[in-house]
Amino acid sequence: MKSALAGFAIVIVLALGAWVLLRGDGAKVQASPTSGANVTMENGTQVVRIKVKGGYQPGMSEAKTGIPTVLRFETNGTFDCTSTIRIPSLGITQSLPSSGTTDVAVGDLKPGTLQGTCGMGMYRFSVQSKS
């Protein structure tokens, strides 16, 4: 009886492992860019607002090139890995408060996509910049 139960447990563990491996890399990002509804201008600076809790919303934003830009992260009871953001191309790693607003200056955006992740690399956000 014990060996049958152990065999059943092994099959379940293997099935779950296969499911995790086959479903992708686990990183979550919104499929299409926003219309720019989360991007505003404040005193000559482009501000991209991103809500943080169990991911980043929106996962992808559209902004304009050549304008000083700030990513404004808004947290509200955030205690998971998304409370640390990383933007490797700019050498930025920033811890966010569990609740509040944190501005991260990223300079003048160049054409292309600026990508960031949570501290563990599980959740992603990006800003596509166009002229």
Image: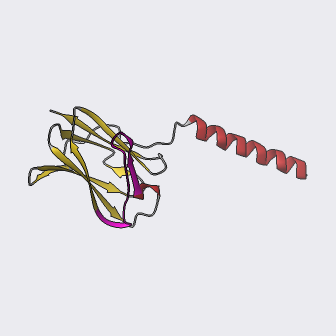
User: Over which residues does the magenta segment extend?
Assistant: 84-101
Indicate the position of residue 32 as horizontal and vertical percent values. Answer: 30, 37
Indicate the position of residue 131 as horizontal and vertical percent values. Answer: 14, 32
Q: Is residue 125 above or below residue 74?
A: above
Task: Say whether residue 17 is left or right of residue 57.
Answer: right
Residue at the image point whose x is 29% and y is 35% from the top: 113
Task: Say whether residue 86 is left or right of residue 13.
Answer: left
Residue at the image point whose x is 71% and y is 45% from the top: 13
Task: Say whether residue 91 is left or right of residue 72.
Answer: right
Task: Depth check: give the residue in front, 31 or 96.
Answer: 96
Indicate the position of residue 30 as horizontal and vertical percent values. Answer: 35, 42
Report which quarter residue 54 is drawn in. bottom left
Question: What colouring style does the render use?
Answer: secondary structure
Indicate the position of residue 22 as horizontal and vertical percent values. Answer: 58, 34
Specify whether residue 96 is painted magenta.
Answer: yes
Secondary structure mostly seen in magenta is strand
